[in-house]
Image (cartoon, rainbow, N blue to C red):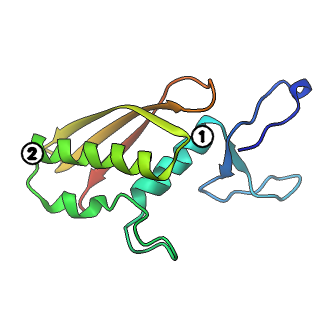
């Protein structure tokens, strides 16, 4: 968590590397995500990481891949939603998950997840992030 001076007019409360690792054209530094975008990056990292793949933290990650091979039902969708909430709460104390909306898309054999979240320690408002969970 970082804070910049008030005179700048913007407040950076949370910061993280941009997932695309793009560079600033002037300074050539890696562009960073701030505030809501930093929280979204954190959520993506948690949900897209398979457990056992992070060195020194084998339990990190949501490990959702296994659920994608179970029957495409509302029960499985509910279980996925519960895993999402549990793993975000476990691994990022700055994110407050307010709601997870799961939709079963039988036609495309996938789940659409919409996560409503806010920051626990700052007033940056409620935001959403959408995930499509499908077999590859």
In this view, 122 is above or below 107: above
Residue 73's label in the rendered image is: 2
Residue 55 horizontal/vertical position (percent): 51, 76
Label 1, secondary structure: give it.
helix
Dot 2, how many residues are within 10 Å of its Cα: few (below 14), some (14-19), or many (20+)? some
Label 2, secondary structure: give it.
loop
Pick the front one: 32 or 97: 97
* Residue at x-position 70% and y-position 44%: 1
* Residue at x-position 51% and y-position 39%: 95
* Residue at x-position 65% and y-position 36%: 35
Left or right of 112 in this view: 10: right
Query: Of the residues under marks 1 and 2, which one precedes in the sequence?
Result: 1
Pick the front one: 46 or 27: 46
**Total numbered labels placed on residues in the image:** 2
In this view, 95 is above or below 135: above
Task: Report, in whole angstroms, how far the alpha carbon at label 1 lies from the one at label 2.
Answer: 31 Å
Dot 1, how many residues are within 10 Å of its Cα: few (below 14), some (14-19), or many (20+)? some
Residue underneath mark 1: 37
Residue 77's label in the rendered image is: none
Whether residue 136 appears in this view of the structure is no
Figure quadrant of residue 134: bottom left
């Amino acid at each position: 968590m970082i804070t910049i001076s008030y005179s700048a007019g913007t407040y950076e409360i949370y910061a993280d590397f941009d997932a695309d690792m793009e560079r600033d054209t002037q300074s050539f530094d890696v562009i960073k995500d701030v505030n809501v975008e930093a929280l979204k990056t954190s959520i993506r990292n948690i949900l897209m990481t398979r457990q056992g793949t992070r060195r020194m933290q084998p339990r990190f990650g949501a490990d959702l891949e296994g659920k994608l091979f179970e029957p495409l039902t509302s029960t499985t969708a509910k279980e996925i939603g519960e895993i999402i909430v549990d793993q975000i709460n476990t691994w990022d104390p700055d994110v407050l998950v307010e709601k997870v909306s799961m939709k079963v898309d039988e036609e495309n054999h996938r789940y659409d997840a919409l996560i409503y979240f806010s920051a626990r320690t700052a007033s940056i408002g409620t935001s959403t992030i959408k995930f499509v969970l499908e077999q590859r």
